[in-house]
Image (spheres, rainbow, N blue to C red):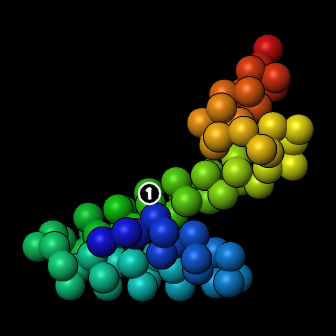
Amino acid sequence: MDLEGFAKRMLKRGAKEEEIISEMRKRILEIKDVSEDYAERLASAVLEEAKCTLRVFSEVKTTKYFGACFRCRIQAFAWENSA
């Protein structure tokens, strides 16, 4: 189950965060034997991770390092923006 990929696709489509969390919670409950509270917290955490990685990629791909591998771009971006 690729929850982060699902969250990213939904964010790119403009879905509301509540809608994304609700749908992910349903999918988690279908597959895993966990409480609704746990599924909700997991869905929220996955959504936050998806938002962070989309934001970082968006910032990095506009830099001069766009042709480099993803890991190299992230490291270069972090180094340039530290301190």
Whole-percent x, y for residue 21 in the image:
46, 76
Q: Left or right: 15 with respect to 4?
A: right
Q: Residue at x 87, y 41 (%)?
A: 63
Q: Which image quadrant: the C terminus?
A: top right
Residue furthest top in the image: 83
Residue 74 in sight here: no
Q: Residue at x 26, y 64 (%)?
A: 38
Q: In the image, is residue 40 above or below residue 60?
A: below
Q: Residue at x 65, y 40 (%)?
A: 69
- Identify the image quadrant of residue 77: top right
Question: In this orientation, does residue 3 appear?
Answer: yes
Disc 1 residue crowd, few under 14, some 14–19, many 20+, Cα 10 Å: some
* Relative height, residue 69 to residue 45 (above, below): above
Q: Quadrant of the N terminus?
A: bottom left
Residue 11 position, x and y percent, is: 64, 75
Q: Secondary structure at mark 1?
A: helix
The part of the image, by quadrant, that contains residue 29 is: bottom left
51 lies left or right of 2: right
**Whether residue 76 is situated above or below residue 18 in the rendered picture:** above
Task: Provide residue 37's location: percent of width, then percent of height.
Answer: 27, 69
Q: Which residue is mark 1?
A: 45
* Of the pair 78 and 24, the residue shown nearer to us: 78
Q: Nearer the viewer, residue 44 or 6?
A: 6
Furthest residue in direction left, as rendered: 33
Q: Residue at x 51, y 64 (%)?
A: 47
| Three-letter code, disc 1 | Ala
Where is residue 64 shown, x and y percent of the image?
Answer: 88, 38
